Amino acid sequence: MIARIVAVVLLAVVATRADAQRISAGAQIAFAEYAEQGTSLRFEGGGPSAHVSLGWRRFDISFSAARLAFVPTEAGDVAEPFDVTQTDVRLRVRATRLVSVEAGFVDREVKPLHAAQSVATMRLGAVMAIPLAAGADVAVRASYLAGSKFSGGGSAPFGVEVGLGVSYAPWWERVRITGDLEFQRLDRSIASAEGRIPAPIQSSTARLGVTVTY
Amino acid sequence: MTRSILGALSLLAVVAAPLTAQSNATLRRAETFYRDLAYGQAVAEARSALGQRLGRSDHVRAYEILGFAYASLDSTRQSTEAFKQLLFLSPDRELDPARISPKITSLFALALGQVLVVRQLRIDGGSFLAGTGTVPIRFTITRNARVRTRIVGVAGEAMVDSSLGDGTLQLRWNGLLRNGRPAPSGDYRLIVEASAGRDTYAASVPVRVVAGAVDTVAHLTALPGYDILSETEIPPRSWRPLGIAFLATAATSGAIIALENSSLRSPRRREIATIGVSTSVVGLLAIRKRPMPVPAPANIRYNALVREQLARRNVEIASENARRRLQVKLAVAMLRTAATKEESP
């Protein structure tokens, strides 16, 4: 469904592309670590990922989706494999030549539901993109994750995301090899008779792929 | 004998061509008598011709024959009077002292000093801005007199000058009429009126004025000699990309390690390692690539100054053009050069 929407939007924008517009789309291989509530719930996984972004003047909006299959890193009865469908939406506004502010939304759906926490959260942060050379740049980003909702209940008053992105055009400026790291920490806690019990969630996702810019 | 031959030669030299155009038979006889050195009969025939209905050129010729014949007869007063009449009719008339007897030319000069006429009236053709430029007017007054110079036409008139003067006078007309407005296109007359005591004389020449719009100045798109420079420049290759890549990797890795939940700490950190190494490799590769253009502050400042100057110059041009659109360019030309006698004493 998301792919269809992205395709339709991409086609519509491409058909009327103005000089100030930028369109890019890419596909990546993602691999990730996921941990919950201590060392017993630790997972590793990977899967395909894709993204599309539209830029107009100082604005950029990007959609990305990944489907990752996780397996427990240690054998045991507590943890079982699960699949994650993660959707990200980011809206960026360039504030200075190097720095943009961004707001967005993350939705991580877990299947089966009881295997891990499904999360939906808002992000608000900044990105610093530094050109290294023609066709090469690096970007560092940090966001605060707010208003998190979990399938197992509870809340996370503190959530943070740190990222590192790099892109390199070995042959043509429009075709770039990309790498992206995304670290998330959500200090989730759940209410119980003894008070609030910490149930933190932490994940690291790396993506390597190719992006084509038009 | 010598005197007679000289007089005849003089007359032939100066008036041969006009005399052949004479249509009056009496005048032709007068000329024949003069050539035959029969000055008395020449005078009689010329006077007889003057009693007849003559055209302007015949009138001039009759007085000329009289002046020359009387001079040949040593009748100074009568010769002078004839020349005076000749000058009233044809004030621009000149006698060539190299070819005509000094006795005749001296009598002609004597007559010239006794009459009041306006000679050699000219207006130099040309184009100029009404109210700003001028067109020269030149003429000669034979005696000291009050001289009024006017431009008169259907659209109005202008007083060019009113003053005392004699000899050659040079005046200028600024193209404005008496109402202060530029003269519209049309035919005008340049009139010079001279008065000295009871003597008055007026001469005029027709003048054509063509009024038109003043050319405007084109706006500038560039200042001559000042080209807009590139506002970016390519810096020389350096290790800076690798340094930035290392710095970004270190900052992100440090932040992640610092922010990791102590109870969920990852033992492997393969994601950080993978992307960190990738970033460093890109930094290394970027050293070999063409550096990104960076802003050139000096060129940016220079361009700003050039654009500012350009804008200022264009504002001045716009102001100049607004002024020019209110101006009128006049082209003035004299239609013919012969002065016309208006009045005689």
Image: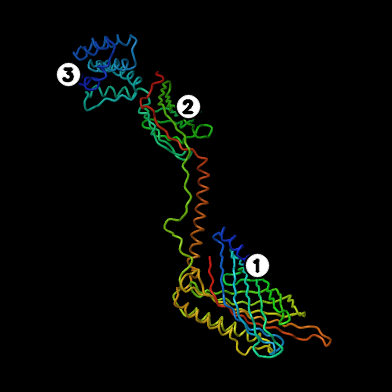
Q: Which residue is denoted by mark 2 in the rendering?
A: B153
Q: CA distance from mark 2 to mark 1?
A: 90 Å
Q: Give the residue type at disc 3.
A: Ile
Contact check, label 1 and label 3, Cβ < 8 Å: no
Q: Is residue B142 visible?
A: no
- Comparing marks 3 and 2, which lies closer to the viewer? 2
Colour mode of the rendering: rainbow
The secondary element bearing badge 1 is classed as loop
- Comparing marks 1 and 3, which lies closer to the viewer? 1
Left or right: B149 in relation to B20 = right
* Quarter of the figure that contains the C terminus of chain B: top left
Quarter of the view holding residue A182: bottom right
- Comparing marks 2 and 1, which lies closer to the viewer? 1
The number of discs equals 3
Q: Nearer the viewer, residue B247 or A72?
A: A72
Question: Which mark identifies residue B5?
Answer: 3
The secondary element bearing badge 3 is classed as helix
Q: Give the residue type at disc 1.
A: Met
Instruction: Please state the chain letter of the residue tagged with numbered disc 1 in the rendered image.
Output: A
Q: Is the residue B208 above or below the residue B78 in the image?
A: below
Q: CA distance from mark 1 to mark 3?
A: 128 Å
Contact check, label 2 and label 1, Cβ < 8 Å: no
Q: Which residue is denoted by mark 1 in the rendering?
A: A1
Left or right: B213 in relation to B110 = right
Q: Give how far across and how far down residue B30 sits, in percent.
A: 25, 12
Contact check, label 3 and label 2, Cβ < 8 Å: no
